[in-house]
Amino acid sequence: MSQISQRDAREGIAGREHALADVFVTMADTLVDDYDIVDLLQQLVAACVHLLGATAAGLLLVDQGGGLALVASSDEESRLLELYQLQNNEGPCLDCIHTSAPVVSGDLNADAQRWPSFVPSAAEAGFRSVVALPLRLRQQIVGGLNLFYAATQNLPAADQRLAQALADVATIGILQQRAAHKNLILAEQLQHALNSRVTIEQAKGMIAERKGVTVDVAFSSLRRYARNHNLKLTDVAGKVIVGEIDPTAE
């Protein structure tokens, strides 16, 4: 390897380490009384795409009634595929949550019999392999993280451990609550996240329709406005729905 190649490799490793440190610092900020759980989980899926080379990522949470709901996705394709899993009650993320164990497919075509409905839909969306990881703390599981890849590949063991570490930190953030009201606050936090996601999806759709842009562009404008004005993502979405702000105007 040339000196230039060695230097580029070292800089790449250092850059990833710095980005990873930033993500864990951000996750640690959830250990306070008030934080935006939807934005936290959105940052988690974005970090998985950035740090683990995933093509896309999505996250499902167990809701107050014990069912599953989509809370975060890195793009529209992964959002639709996660919803497809829920609608058809089939897919790696559901298996992961039900078993509380990682589910890995380095070649989805080889698992067509295992997931006869999911595999063709994943292929149509451009995904060829998947890694699903549980969001769990000891015996309690609160959701699942899906990493989608455009190529057939097996995620290196070190990267899978890193993805699980990110999921574990996010789980701690979700489960963080006042000891005296543990069960009540957990239920409220999870339900608030699911309700917030509905508001965000409505706002995304309104922006996309009014401005003639994709839902991914619409979502980016929502997040950018929230960051620039130090507002919660859900609050910005609510203001869009009632017509108080136009996040694309900036």
Image: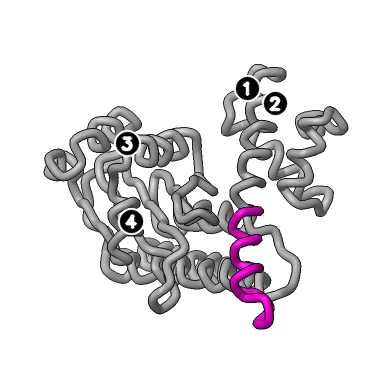
Residue in view at x 69 percent, y 25 percent: 206
The amino acid at mark 3 is Asn
Residue, disc 1: 213
The amino acid at mark 4 is Ala
Verify CB contact (< 8 Å) between mark 3 and mark 1.
no
Q: CA distance from mark 3 to mark 4?
A: 17 Å
Residue in view at x 71 percent, y 64 percent: 35
Tell me which numbered mark, 3 or 4, is placed earlier along the sequence: 3
Q: Is residue 227 above or below residue 75?
A: below
Tell me which numbered mark, 3 or 1, is placed earlier along the sequence: 3
Q: CA distance from mark 4 to mark 2?
A: 31 Å
Verify CB contact (< 8 Å) between mark 1 and mark 2.
yes
Give the residues drawn in magenta, as a range: 176-192
Few, some or many C-alpha atoms within 10 Å of disc 2 (few <14, some 14-19, many ≥20)? many
Image side of residue 49 versus residue 222, left or right? left
The amino acid at mark 2 is Ile
149 magenta-colored: no
Tell me the number on the disc at residue 88: 3
Residue in view at x 63 percent, y 26 percent: 205
- Magenta stretch, overall SS: helix
Q: Position of residue 3 (x, y in %)?
A: 37, 67
Count the numbered circles shown: 4
Tell me which numbered mark, 1 or 4, is placed earlier along the sequence: 4
The quarter of the image holding the N terminus is: bottom left
Tell me the number on the disc at residue 237: none
Q: CA distance from mark 1 to mark 4?
A: 30 Å
Residue, disc 2: 207
Comparing labels 1 and 2, the label whose residue is closer to the camera: 2
Q: Toward the viewer: 27 or 51?
A: 27
Tell me which numbered mark, 1 or 2, is placed earlier along the sequence: 2
